[in-house]
Amino acid sequence: MEKRPLTAIEYFRSTLSIIVFFLLLILIYTPVVLLLLIFSFGKLTNFIMEKMVPPLGRFVMWIAGIKFRIRKHTDHLPENALYIVNHSSTLDVLTILATGFPRIRFVAKWEFQYNPIFFLLGRLTGQVFIKRQDSDKAVETLRKSQNRIKRKQLSLLMAPEGSRKHPGIIGPFKKGPFRMAIDLGYPIVPVYFEGNRELSEGGLLMTRTGTCTAHIYPPIDTSGWTLENLDNHISEVREMYLEWAGIKDHE
């Protein structure tokens, strides 16, 4: 389906939302986060991730004219889990921030650290940055983070497609997130972002007005997963995403 071009008002709202996002990060969030972490000796990191970060994502989307919804298709979320999301839009950054999973940390691309604000806030709050182009380095970084994640009883959020630039609506799934779930002994909670791709598919956060929804599905038990049957399980999970995306002729 051909997407309509952005209107002048949508360009204005998108530009304003980007400006507000960075102003809030620089003038309010960074100094407040620094003070909270200093005076709490780092103990308020989860509070920051769960209570302060989601309103930022939601407010920026509101400025851009986007209504964000969360729909839970399960009554129970595990205390610790590895959350996975589909990734095909720059808008995913805001919807990830806005969802507010408990005790969550994000696995993000290394290049985010080229922005000094993202570098500072990411390092202070314990996010994990990986070099996607270097799979050996990425695996090494994830393994180094594994002990900290388990010790502090944190959850992780990863995008199995790796990059938003991939063929098709749902790209090929990499093994990293699923191998990480096995190593941590965590269930996998699939999250499907509906509407993100239709509203914004460019490299910049220029977006149409509309609605996007985070669908949170029941956790998947990984206790019986092994390296030998991992490929089959990855295919099964990807099939679920293809169905949610409405793709009848599965790739």
Image (spheres, rainbow, N blue to C red):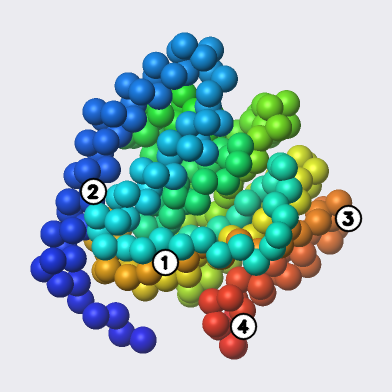
- Residue wearing tag 2: 18
Q: Nearer the viewer, mark 2 or mark 1?
A: 1
Hey, which residue is sitting farthest left in the picture? 8
User: Viewed as shown, does residue 239 lie left or right of 111?
Assistant: right
**The residue under label 2 is which amino acid type?**
Ile
- Residue wearing tag 4: 250
Residue at image coords 52%, 38%: 50
**The residue under label 1 is which amino acid type?**
Cys
Q: In this rendering, is residue 66 above or below 39? A: below
Q: Tell me if label 2 and label 1 are in contact, CB under 8 Å.
A: no
Hey, which residue is sitting farthest front in the picture? 75
Quarter of the figure that contains the C terminus = bottom right
Spot occupied by residue 175 in the image (x, y as percentages of width and height):
67, 54
- Residue wearing tag 1: 212
How far apart marks 4 and 3 lie (CA) works out to 26 Å
User: Considering the numbered disc 1 on the image, is that residue within a helix, a strand or a loop?
Assistant: strand
User: Considering the numbered disc 2 on the image, is that residue within a helix, a strand or a loop?
Assistant: helix
First in sequence: mark 3 vs mark 1: 1
Res 55 → quadrant: top left
Front-most of residues 132 and 97: 97
Residue at image coords 49%, 28%: 125
How far apart marks 4 and 1 lie (CA) works out to 23 Å
Q: Nearer the viewer, mark 4 or mark 3?
A: 3
